[in-house]
Each structure stands twice: as structure tokens, then as C-alpha cells.
Amino acid sequence: MLPSERGTANKKMRALLRWLWDVAVQPVLNHLGLLESVDSMPKTRVFWVTSGLLGLFPLHAAGKGDKAPSQNAYAHIFSSYIPSFSALSFARRCESKVIARPPKMALITMPRIAGVLGPLSTEDEVKAIREGFTVSVSAEGTSSSAAQLNELCQPSAAEVLHQVRGGDIDTLHLACHAEPDLNDPSSTSLLFGSNPDAQMPDPITVRELSGTEGLIRSDQRPPLRLAYLSACCTAQQYDLELIDENIHLAASFQLSGFPAVIGTLWEADDVAAVVIAKAFYQTLFQLDQASCTSGDSHESGDRIARALHVASTACRQRKIARGDASDDILAWAAFVHIGA
């Protein structure tokens, strides 16, 4: 997107968020009595059970912007999305199996991809995640043999699925291209492949994730906790005729056994992806450690949603050379938490 186009898109998005606040989010929060206090880290999480056209809107970002601090959703709550009550029940059953343990993460990147799509700048994101992981684990005093960060660059689709089905991991971070299928949402895919010079990439589709060939976890492996999909539009819906079905990559990962998924509502900004990933993992590991130390009752999914709220705030409040980072809604509001 050209800078001029981005400016126009952000202007339209600001108008949309003001409207969403007035007609949808503010009335709900007022009814729930959640407008009395303003907090940089709200205590209350709201699950937005979205279907139909409402599922296309960034309800978590609704508001009047930082010039009106109390008139924004993020000043009063932190948000999660879920496509249905049955999906939330399933995610909570999966979450109940998550155990307190040192993090074991597979960090999978695809800087180059076969076909016509251009290269991805993944180096800064990898560095940020590696730093966040190392600093947080060191602060926790966790032994390197217990905490694991397994980095895979340019893997095949089979290798990615193996990490989930049989790998000794609880967290999966994917930095790759996603390819939508506007005619068949179930064919929307994440793209992998060890040979960037091949004619075609090696995809994992929504259909594969949702079907019997999806993510079948061995009972001998640790329960899955989180899938972080750092790719464009992984929580976006394309077919308005199937809009009630919530057919997208993030929902497929959640329904495949991940109790929590981080996805994107639109194209992911490269700089924002780095800022949010680093702040997210640092915050999450700190919350995990605090929970173990103090016996905090917050569940795993609650800590994940809180960590994303903190990371989005860091992105919105970061210093930039020109303008105001909070005005770049396309950057800080793209990432959402889906699940328990």
C-alpha cells in the first residue's frame, strides 16, 4: 500500500472506529458498568462473539482515539474474539489441559517463497522474538534445557504439521505469507516450502486444518497453548455468503486444538509485527512467571489476551519520526486474540 493510500485508509478507519464506539461498543460497556474507570491495563476481558457482518469489524479498537482517552474500548477492557459459544466451550476444554511449564516454542519463518509473491522481511521479527524469549527466560531463572526455542527457516508444509502433531512444543509462531481464496475460503492457505525456486509453494489450507487430516496431537506430547499467525489477513473473512461460518485460518487453528490464536484482521505491517511480537512474548512470559510465583488465578488464555493488549498499546504509543503512531490504526489494531 502506498503512503498516500495508507493515509486515506487510516482516515476512513478512524471514522469507522468512532461510529463503532457510538453505536455498538460504548452501549455494551455502559450496560455492563465498565465505563467507570480508565486503566492502561484494564481488569476485565470481554469476549466478542461475532458472526455476520459484525465479525468483520475491529471492535477491540473502537473509540475516539488517544485525544479522548476515556472514549476507547482499550481504556476499559481487553478483548478476545470467538466465533460461537460452542467454539468458546471447546477452546476452554483445550485450555484446561494446558500445564504450567517453561515455554517450548517453534518459530517458523518463510523469508522466501516459491511463485510470484515477494520475499518477507522476517529477520527483525526473529531477532525481536529471540530477544524477548531469552530475556524473559533469563529473568525467570529457567534452565535452557527446559525452555526451548526451535527455529525453522523455509520448512515444508509437512515439517510444520509435524511440529504441531509430534513436536515437543506448546507454542507455534508462524511468520509467512498467507494466500486467500476468494471463491473458496476453505482453500485459503499458509504458504511454505524448502525450495523458493520451485514453481509453486507448499500450502497448508483451512480445509486441511479443519478436516480429519488436520492437527491431530499425540497424547504423549504437551498440550498446545498458542498459535501466533504473523501473516496477512489470517482472521479475515472473504465470502459474504459464508460469513456466518467464520471460515478463516485463525479459526481453523483454534478449532484444531489451539485454545488461543493470534491472528490478523488485515495486512500485517512489518514494523508493527516486530514491535508487537517482542512486547507480546516479553509480557506473556512475565505474566506466566508472576502467575506461578503468586498463585494468580488468571488462566492461560487470560494472560495471552492481556499480553496482546499490552503489546498493541506499546505499538500505539511508540515514538515515530513524524506524526502520531496512534493514528496508524492499520498498524496497531490488526492483531487480535481468538479463543479462550
Image (cartoon, rainbow, N blue to C red):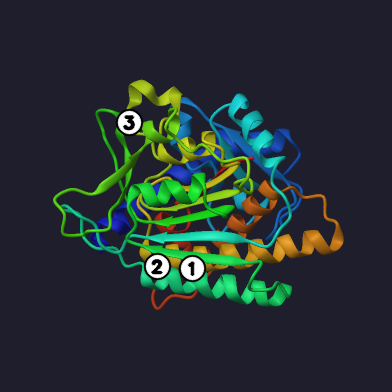
Q: Is residue 107 above or below residue 43?
A: below
Q: Which residue is mark 2?
A: 271
Q: Residues within 10 Å of mark 1 (few under 14, many from 20)?
A: many
Q: Amino acid at mark 2?
A: Val
Q: Which residue is mark 1?
A: 275
Q: State the residue lying farthest toward the front.
A: 220
Tell me: 96 left or right of 163.
Answer: right
Tell me: 227 left or right of 195.
Answer: right
Q: Amino acid at mark 1?
A: Val
Nearer mark to the viewer, of 3 and 2: 3
Q: Residues within 10 Å of mark 2 (few under 14, many from 20)?
A: some
Residue at x 20% of width, y 55% of height: 114
Q: Are marks 1 and 2 in contact (CB under 8 Å)?
A: yes
Q: Residues within 10 Å of mark 3 (few under 14, many from 20)?
A: many
Q: Which residue is mark 3?
A: 185
Residue at x 48% of width, y 31% of height: 54
Q: For this rendering, which residue is in front, 35 or 258?
A: 258
